[in-house]
Image (spheres, helix red, strand yellow):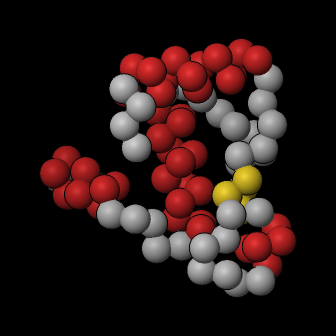
Amino acid sequence: MEMKKAAADERPARSAEEAVERLREALHGVGITLPSLRIDPVTGAQGHPYALVDLGRCNIGVASKLAAALRVKGGDV
């Protein structure tokens, strides 16, 4: 089962909604919540297949946690 989940996470998201949900889950997994995380309302409303993801704003504590999580992962995307 873990193998199947890992493979699904490696493929590109098929929609903006899926991309946002994957990002939200991944951030939650390392203890980070971006309250403003959403699909950009302008590009999303147009139904553009590559709508932008709006990460929103966060405080210094969340920014520091995010930077630390990225460093631990080694910056792999």
Q: Where, quadrant-wise, is the C terminus in this rendering?
A: top left
Left or right, residue 52 beside residue 4: right
Residue at (40% x, 20% y) in the render: 72
Left or right, residue 56 beside residue 33: right
Q: Quadrant of residue 39?
A: bottom right
Q: Residue furthest front?
A: 75
Residue at (67% x, 71% y) in the render: 51
**Tag count in the figure?**
0
Q: Residue furthest bottom?
A: 47
Q: Quadrant of residue 63?
A: top right
Residue 31 coordinates in the image, percent (x, y):
54, 25
- Look at the picture and state if 11 lies above or below 61: below
Residue 67 coordinates in the image, percent (x, y):
57, 22
Residue at (59% x, 56% y) in the render: 20
Left or right, residue 66 beside residue 59: left
Q: Quadrant of residue 21?
A: bottom right
- Look at the picture and state if 27 lies above or below 51: above
30 or 42, nearer to the observer: 42
Residue at (70% x, 84% y) in the render: 47
73 or 39, nearer to the observer: 73
Residue 7 coordinates in the image, percent (x, y):
23, 57
- Look at the picture and state if 33 lies above or below 10: above
Residue 15 coordinates in the image, percent (x, y):
54, 73
